[in-house]
C-alpha cells in the first residue's frame, strides 16, 4: 500500500508547489536582480550588460535536456536542483555584505540560472510522468497560474519587502540580504516538502542509452532546421519582441532613477507594487484574455492585430518618459502596457506551438523557446549603453521603432490554416 501511495498522489498536493518553485528563480534571476543592482548603485549600462548573460542557460537548456533524461530520475533532479537553489540564494544573501558583492552575486546568479533551467527540464518531464492524460489537460492551467503567482511573489512581495526594509532601516545592502535570505529559506522549505510529497512515478527512470540519445539529438535538430521557411521563422522568433527586449531591461531603472536624469523616482516598494504586483497581475490577465480570443478566432486572424498590440508598451513608456507623472498615473499606465503585452504575447506562444509538430514536437518547442530566450538576451547587452547615450525619452522612441522588423516578418512566415 505504501508503494502505491508514493507511486500515485493527488496532483493538487505537488503540482501547485512544484510550479511555484519553478517560477521564483526565473523572476529573481532575470527581473529582481536588475532592481537589486540598481539599488546597490550599479549603473544602467553595466547592470543591463551583465544581467543579460543570465538568460543564457534558458537559451542553452535544450542541449543538456538529454542528460536529464539519461541520468538518474526526474524526481531526484528536482530535489537536487531545489536544494542547490537554496544554497545559491543563501550565497547571494551573504555576499551582498561584501565589498566585492557585484562579482560574487553575479556568479551566484549565473550558477542559479543553470540550476533553474535544469529544474525546468526535470519538472516539465516529471509532470508528464506523474499525471495521466486527463490530469495533464486539467492541470496545465493550474501550473501556469502558480508559475505566475511565483512571479508576483518574487517581483512584487520580495521587492516590496526589500523596499520597506530600506525605508525603515536605511540599510540597502542589509535589506536586500534579508530579502534573498527569505527566498533561500522558502526554497529550503519547498525542497523538504517535495522530498516527502513528490510521488515516484513508475516511468521515472533513466531513459535510453547514450548512443540512442545522441542519434535522437541529431534527428531533433535536423528536422527542426529543415522545416518550411526556417530562416524567416527564426527571424520572426527573434524579432517579434525585439523592441520589448530592449525596453524590459531598462523598465525598472527608469522607475527608480531620479527625475533629474529622466526617471520617475519611485521607491523600491512602489516598484514592487506597481510593476511587480499590479503589472504582473495584468500581464497574467492579458495572457488569459489573449488565449480566449485566439481560441475563438484562430491564430491566422489574430496574429497581425496582436503583433501591433504587443508593441504598445513602447508607446506607454514614451508617454511616461515625456510626462514623468506621479505614481497614481504610473500604476494604471503600467497595468495597460502589461495587459497589452500579455495579450499580444499569447499569439507568439501559440505560433511556437504550431511549429512544434511531428515526432519531436516537445524538443522542437524547446528549441523555439531557446531561440526566444536568445532574442531577449542579445538586445539586453546594449540596452543600457543605448539608454545612457540617448536618455530615457529617445531610448523609448527607439524601442518603438525596433518593434517594426518583427511586424515585417509576418508577411513571410508560414501560417496554420485552422483555428489555434
Image: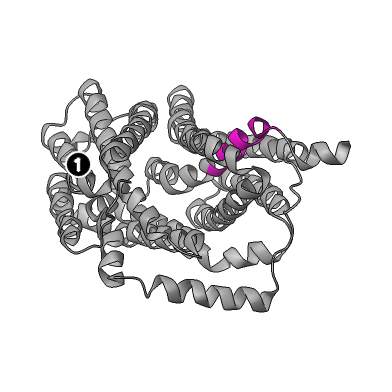
- Residue 275 visible in image: no
Q: Residue furthest front?
A: 418
User: Considering only vertical position in the picture, is 335 above or below 21?
Assistant: above
- Residue 395 visible in image: yes
Q: Residue furthest right?
A: 1
Q: Say what secondary structure mark 1 lies in.
A: helix
**Residue 162 location (% of width, % of height):** 47, 31
Left or right: residue 364 versus residue 186 is left
Left or right: residue 385 versus residue 375 is left
Residue at image coords 30%, 40%: 294
**Residue 174 location (% of width, % of height):** 53, 35
Question: Residue 402 lies in what quarter of the image?
Answer: bottom left
**Residue 129 location (% of width, % of height):** 66, 49
User: Considering only vertical position in the picture, is 409 above or below 109?
Assistant: below
Question: Residue 237 lies in what quarter of the image?
Answer: bottom left
Left or right: residue 16 versus residue 337 is right
Q: Foreground residue, 42 or 404?
A: 404
User: Considering only vertical position in the picture, is 42 above or below 170?
Assistant: below
Residue at image coords 28%, 42%: 251
The residue that mark 1 highlights is: 309
Residue at image coords 55%, 44%: 22
Residue at image coords 58%, 39%: 134
Residue 397 colored in magenta in the image: no
Q: Which residues are magenta?
A: 10-22
Picture mark count? 1
Q: Foreground residue, 394 or 153?
A: 153
**Residue 137 location (% of width, % of height):** 53, 39
Amino acid at each position: 500500500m505504501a508503494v502505491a501511495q508514493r507511486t500515485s498522489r493527488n496532483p493538487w498536493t505537488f503540482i501547485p508547489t512544484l510550479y511555484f518553485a519553478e517560477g521564483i528563480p526565473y523572476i529573481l534571476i532575470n527581473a529582481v536582480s536588475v532592481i537589486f543592482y540598481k539599488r546597490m548603485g550599479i549603473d544602467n549600462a553595466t547592470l543591463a550588460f551583465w544581467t543579460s548573460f543570465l538568460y543564457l542557460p534558458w537559451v542553452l537548456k535544450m542541449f543538456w535536456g538529454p542528460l536529464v533524461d539519461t541520468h538518474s530520475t526526474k524526481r531526484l533532479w528536482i530535489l537536487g536542483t531545489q536544494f542547490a537553489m537554496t544554497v545559491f540564494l543563501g550565497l547571494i544573501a551573504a555576499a551582498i555584505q561584501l565589498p566585492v558583492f557585484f562579482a560574487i552575486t553575479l556568479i551566484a546568479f549565473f550558477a542559479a540560472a543553470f540550476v533553474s533551467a535544469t529544474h525546468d527540464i526535470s519538472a516539465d518531464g516529471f509532470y508528464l510522468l506523474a499525471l495521466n492524460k486527463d490530469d495533464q489537460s486539467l492541470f496545465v492551467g493550474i501550473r501556469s497560474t502558480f508559475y505566475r503567482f511565483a512571479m508576483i511573489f518574487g517581483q512584487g512581495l520580495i521587492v516590496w519587502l526589500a523596499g520597506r526594509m530600506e525605508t525603515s532601516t536605511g540599510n540597502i545592502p542589509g535589506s536586500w540580504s534579508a530579502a534573498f535570505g527569505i527566498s533561500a529559506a522558502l526554497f529550503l522549505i519547498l525542497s523538504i516538502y517535495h522530498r516527502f510529497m513528490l510521488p515516484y512515478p513508475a516511468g521515472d527512470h533513466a531513459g535510453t542509452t547514450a548512443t540512442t540519445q545522441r542519434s535522437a539529438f541529431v534527428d531533433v535538430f535536423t528536422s527542426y532546421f529543415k522545416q518550411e521557411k526556417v530562416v524567416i521563422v527564426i527571424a520572426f522568433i527573434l524579432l517579434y519582441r525585439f523592441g520589448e527586449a530592449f525596453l524590459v531591461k531598462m523598465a525598472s531603472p527608469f522607475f527608480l532613477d531620479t527625475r533629474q536624469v529622466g526617471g520617475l523616482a519611485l521607491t523600491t516598494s512602489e516598484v514592487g507594487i506597481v510593476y511587480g504586483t499590479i503589472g504582473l497581475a495584468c500581464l497574467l490577465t492579458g495572457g488569459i484574455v489573449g488565449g480566449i480570443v485566439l481560441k475563438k478566432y484562430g491564430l491566422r486572424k489574430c496574429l497581425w492585430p496582436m503583433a501591433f498590440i504587443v508593441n504598445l508598451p513602447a508607446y506607454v513608456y514614451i508617454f511616461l518618459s515625456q510626462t514623468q507623472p506621479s505614481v497614481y498615473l504610473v500604476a494604471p499606465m503600467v497595468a495597460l502596457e502589461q495587459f497589452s503585452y500579455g495579450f499580444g504575447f499569447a499569439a507568439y506562444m501559440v505560433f511556437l506551438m504550431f511549429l512544434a509538430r511531428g515526432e519531436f514536437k516537445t524538443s522542437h518547442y524547446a528549441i523555439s523557446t531557446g531561440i526566444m530566450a536568445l532574442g531577449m538576451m542579445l538586445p539586453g547587452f546594449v540596452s543600457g549603453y543605448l539608454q545612457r547615450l540617448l536618455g530615457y525619452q529617445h531610448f523609448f522612441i527607439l524601442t518603438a521603432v525596433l518593434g517594426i522588423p518583427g511586424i515585417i516578418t509576418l508577411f513571410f512566415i508560414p501560417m496554420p490554416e485552422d483555428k489555434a
